[in-house]
Structures are given as C-alpha cells and as structure tokens.
Amino acid sequence: MSRVTLMTAEEVEAFLEREFPQIHYGGRIYAVEAVGPLTARMRMTYHERHIRPGGTLSGPSIMALADLALYVAILAQLGPVALAVTTSLSFNFLRKPLPGDLIAECRLLKLGKRLAVGEVLLRSDGQAEIACHATGTYSIPDRT
Amino acid sequence: MSRVTLMTAEEVEAFLEREFPQIHYGGRIYAVEAVGPLTARMRMTYHERHIRPGGTLSGPSIMALADLALYVAILAQLGPVALAVTTSLSFNFLRKPLPGDLIAECRLLKLGKRLAVGEVLLRSDGQAEIACHATGTYSIPDRT
Amino acid sequence: MSRVTLMTAEEVEAFLEREFPQIHYGGRIYAVEAVGPLTARMRMTYHERHIRPGGTLSGPSIMALADLALYVAILAQLGPVALAVTTSLSFNFLRKPLPGDLIAECRLLKLGKRLAVGEVLLRSDGQAEIACHATGTYSIPDRT
Amino acid sequence: MSRVTLMTAEEVEAFLEREFPQIHYGGRIYAVEAVGPLTARMRMTYHERHIRPGGTLSGPSIMALADLALYVAILAQLGPVALAVTTSLSFNFLRKPLPGDLIAECRLLKLGKRLAVGEVLLRSDGQAEIACHATGTYSIPDRT
C-alpha cells in the first residue's frame, strides 16, 4: 500500500472550507496539520463549547474530530471528487483528555474500491498516552 | 430485570441542566421525552448548527444524542448521585436522517455494579426506519 | 422494509451443508430454526468443544453463531447466489450463558445494495436475558 | 505506562494449558510467541478445521485468536491470579488471510483497575498487510 496522496493538507482544508463550512459553526477549531500516504493528522483547538466539568473535553467533540480525521485521510488519498460517507464508527474512551488541544492521528488500514477502514489515535497535545482510540468505516462511491 | 426508576424525566432534565449546562451551548436542543425501567427516549430539535449539505444531520450530532440517551437511561435508574462515564460507543449509520427532529430510544441491556451496556435506535421523528444504531458502555463508579 | 424471503430455513440449511461443510467439523451443532423477512433464528447445540470452566460457553463459539445468524438472514433474503463476506462484527458480552443450547435471533437493520447491517441477540435456550449482543456488517457482491 | 511483565511467554502458556485445556480441543494450534510490557504475540497454526473455501481462515478462528491474544497480554502483565473476562470485542475484517499460520500482535492501550482495553493486529505469517483489526475490553476482577 505505498500510495501517493492526491491533495496536500492545504488543499484538503480549502475543500472542507468550501464544502462543509458548517463544521466551523461557532468558531474555527479544526486544522489539518499533515497528510501523508494513508495518514492524516488533525488538531482541534480547545474551545469553550467542548469543555465539560473538570476542564475535560466532551465525548462528542472527540468523536467529531476522529470522524473528520478519517475523512481527511480518505480525501487526501482519493482527491476532492470523493463523496465518501461514514458507515460505522467505534470508540474506546481510555483517559480523560487534558484541558487543551486534542490531536488526532489517523491511519487507513484499508482503502478498497467500496470501503475505507481506518483507526484514529486521539491524544491531548504533547501527551504520549492515548485518550481515545477510534476505528471507522467509510463507504466510497462508485467512480466512473 | 424489572426495575423501578429513581428519577422522572423532569428530574433527569433538571439534573442535566444543573450539572451539564454546556450541552445547551448554542441553543437548547435536547429534551428528555420519557424514562422507564431501563429505557429512555430523547428528542433533538433540528438546529442550524447540525445541518449538513442536503439538509441531513451531522454524524457528531447523532452520536451526541445517542451518548446522552444512554446517560439519561442510567441516571433515571440509578439516581442523581451516579457519576457514570462513557467507556465505549459504537455506531452503524444506516440511512441519512431527514431534515427535522431526531428521536433516540435507548434500552439498557445490562445494568451491573460496574458496567452499564445499552443500545440506542435513532430515527427521524415519525419515521419507522432506523437512521443509526448505537451501542455503548458506561462505567459505574463504586457506590458506598 | 416489508420483504419476501427467497429461501426457506430448510433451503438455507441445505445450502450451508453444500457450500460450507466445514462449519460442521467435529459434530453438527448449528441449526436454522426459522427465517422470516429480514430475520433469522439459529440454535447452537451444547457441545463439549465449546465448554469453558464452570460449564459456560466459549466466547468464540458465541461469536461464530452470531456471524452465522447474520449470514443466514442475508441468504434467506437474497437467495443462494449471494457471496456475502463479513466486513465487521462487534460484541458486548453481558452475562455468562448457561450450560445448554444457545439461541441467536438476528434482525437485519439494513439490506442495501452493497452492505447489509444487522444485530443479533444471543440467549441461553429458554432464558429472557441476553447473554451477548452483536452487530455486524456484510459486504454484498455486485449482482448482474 | 512502562511496566514489567509478571509472567514469561512459557509461564503464560503453561497457565493456559492448566486452566483452559479446552482451547486445544481438536489439536494444539495456539502458541504464545512473545510477551512484553503491555504486548503479546500469538501464532495460530494452520489447521483443517479452520479452513474455508479457497483456503482462507474462518472468521471465528480469527476472532478466537484475537480474544486469546488480549487475554495473554493481560495475564503476562497481571500474573496468574487474574480472572479477567471479555466484555466486548470489535473486528474489522480487511483482507482474506492466506492459507497458512496467522499471527496476532496485541497491544494494551489501557490497563486500569477495572478495565483493560487493547488492540490486536492479525496478519498472515510473513505478510505486512493486516487481515483483521480487533479491539477488545476485559473486565478485571477486584484484587485484594
């Protein structure tokens, strides 16, 4: 699976901006830090609307970042024409994230004709320990 | 598993209001419609910040509702002292929700001393077909 | 999703017999008890090779039955030409099964062109409580 | 999470032999190849009873190996007193395994007081590509 990406991090970000402006509703918090062959790294900036008692991040904000990281990894690989949709997501919440940015590192385990499957490790910025482990599947539309 | 709930829907809602005001950030959209023995029904009002192209709901907003429905079912059963935390969540996204309210029906499959496990069926209001099927696990703190 | 099944329980069993004789390796323990629109019920006979300390059933034998129940429900719906393959399975083990037969009740939540998604409830014969809850996805080959 | 293991691969194997002789029913096929801090590597020898049409391995045999690899990693870490039980398992089947031995590499992502969570990568012997990705949770009994 040595593959060349079709989009840069900047191109993916511009695409998201254009096609999914809603993800920035309430303040811009998602950034594509890097994309590579079957990989992507995203950052979610710490923001009031995701904070839960004790300063930790809400579960849904963690899940949103994982889902987005998978999508970004697929986009970078397949290019802007891809209208992939999430078909499944699974999460194990391992440790409470610290108050601060959350980093998602995604690796695609399979990029088939119909399905892409990947895993995402989510950590508080600068921490070694994993706060949440996610796996997910996207359905890839037929390309003609 | 014939059990008596310890909180009414109104009590659960008041508890969420007090302990987790952040979930209403940006507009009140979650309502506890009913709780019963090992069950809960929630409604998420259609809101601009969850809309995606074509009028459908964002995946993260669906996931947030499922997580909350599980928590509400556990709270109703165990009472307001419970500081349960999500340890895992799994989602199968089956059909795009319609533009409109989303209803979550949660059933706890197990409510043990340490773990609660439940499933959540998510449907667009008034629809028979399931938009998303979720299962989740909460860790229950030791009670003394 | 009111659908007519294309195969009876007997036809599905004969198909499995012919195409997957290996599942009966070491003794015939699986029986298709019923199929219906998007549903299937299977029985796994209690057998020495699946017993674990205390008389309970091994996890893998429970998982095997769940996977087979999903396949049977799909077969009954699509007919014998379908070469579906499992793409994902998730299990929550809720209670130890009793020493005895295990019953699987499968319901397909979605039967699309490319993907079938279903859930399976596994109980010890005659028990109301669920021993294991499973969800799974099969990839459906293109039909021409 | 720099931890010292309490059991060697040989000790874990002897423990399994003594406590779970049933896993060798029909022929000895599981071997503990290595254990390390929060890791384990297992081998499943290719055996007639796990073969499916085309020479590939059955799904249940792959799931059994993943479950066992998680258990072995936990045992090595906690020692022989641990009576951990599987509470959840999730699998993504990515590619058909080749006819031959299957290798499982397990890494524990969390080893808490009550829950252990890990992932398992399963590959055909000598192959780089992942045939199946698994995650699982074990409940750890109270230690006194």
Image (spheres, coloured by chain):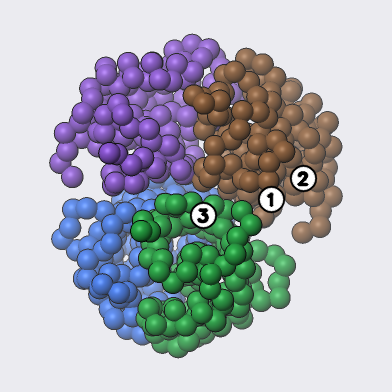
Chain colours: A green, B blue, C purple, D brown
The 10 Å Cα crowd at callout 3, few under 14, some 14 to 19, many 20 or more, is: some
**Residue type highlighted by circle 2:** Gln
Q: Which residue is mark 3?
A: A111
Residue corresponding to mark 2? D77
**Few, some or many residues within 10 Å of mark 2 (<14, 14–19, 20+):** many
Instruction: Work out whether mark 1 precedes mark 2 in sequence or the reverse, and give the earlier one.
Output: 2
Q: Quick one: quadrant of the C terminus of chain B?
A: bottom right
Residue B137, horizontal then vertical, whole percent: 48, 53
Taking the spot 17% from the left edge, 58% from the top edge, the residue there is B127
Both on one chain, marks 1 and 3?
Answer: no
Q: Nearer the viewer, residue D133 or C128?
A: D133
- Mark 1 lies on a secondary structure that is strand
Q: Is residue D42 left or right of residue B6?
A: right
When the figure is inspected, residue A59 is found, relative to residue C100, above or below; the finding is below
Farthest-out residue, front: A144
Q: What kind of residue is marked 3?
A: Leu
Q: CA distance from mark 3 to mark 2?
A: 35 Å
Neighbor class of circle 1 (other Cα within 10 Å; few <14, some 14-19, many 20+) is many
Gap in Å between the C-alphas at discs 1 and 3?
26 Å
1 or 3: mark nearer the eye: 3
Where does the image place residue C112, in percent across and percent down from the top left? 28, 47
Q: Is residue A63 visible?
A: no
For the point 43% across and 33% down, which residue is it? C67
Same subunit under labels 3 and 2? no
Label 1 marks which chain's residue?
A: D
Q: Which residue is mark 1?
A: D108
Chain where mark 2 sits:
D
Whether residue D36 is visible, yes or no, is yes
C138 horizontally vs D75: left or right: left
| Secondary-structure class at tag 2 | helix
Query: Is there a contact, CB below 8 Å, between mark 1 and mark 2?
Result: yes
